[in-house]
Image (cartoon, helix red, strand yellow):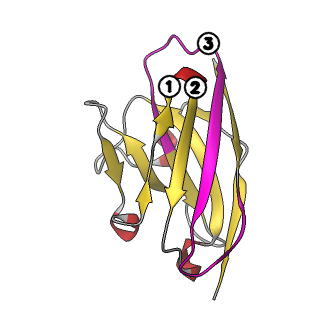
Amino acid sequence: QVQLVASGGGLAQAGGPLRLSCVISGDTSGRYHMAWFRQAPGKERELVAGFSWADTAYYTDSVKGRFTIPRDNAKNTVFLQMNSLNVDDTAVYYCATGVAWGPKRASYHLADSWGQGTQVTVSS
């Protein structure tokens, strides 16, 4: 079992950057891949970015070219670097673990563990 703690959310200006962090602790010896989800009011939780079986990064279409998912394995930390933010990026962001992520593995039902969520609000 792993524990995830997400941080870094807040208020950002449209067009600006923001970086989220997710620290993983507990039993990190298992085979899992990290992902970031988000949930806007009235909408279903959606996969934003995650690592595939091949450990390559996957991004949903709406964030491609703007978001990246760097990580620091030595610190058991995964980031979500968000650039060129727009108001549609406003949501609660969650980090999660799962077997693997990609276009056919994008459902939040596939997640094994969740961080507590961090609010991102983008103002125009």
- Residue 46: percent from the left, percent from the top? 49, 58
Q: Is residue 68 above or below residue 119?
A: above
Determine which residue is flagged by label 2. 76
- Residue 36: percent from the left, percent from the top? 52, 48
Q: Amino acid at mark 2?
A: Asn
Q: Is residue 104 above or below residue 26?
A: below
Disc 2 crowd rating (10 Å Cα; few below 14, some 14-19, many 20+) is few
- Residue 41: percent from the left, percent from the top? 67, 72
Residue in the picture at 55% in, 72% down: 89
Determine which residue is flagged by label 1. 73
Exactly how many numbered labels are in the figure? 3
Residue contact between numbered discs 2 and 1, judged by CB atoms under 8 Å: yes
Measured Cα–Cα span from mark 2 to mark 1: 5 Å
Determine which residue is flagged by label 3. 27
Front tag of 3 and 2: 2
The quadrant in which the N terminus is found is top right
Is 26 positioned to the left or the right of 65 in the image?
right
- Residue 69: percent from the left, percent from the top? 45, 47
Q: Is residue 13 above or below residue 7?
A: below
What span is in magenta? 9-35
Measured Cα–Cα span from mark 3 to mark 1: 14 Å
Residue contact between numbered discs 3 and 1, judged by CB atoms under 8 Å: no
Q: Secondary structure at mark 2?
A: loop
Front one among 45 and 20? 20
Disc 3 crowd rating (10 Å Cα; few below 14, some 14-19, many 20+) is few
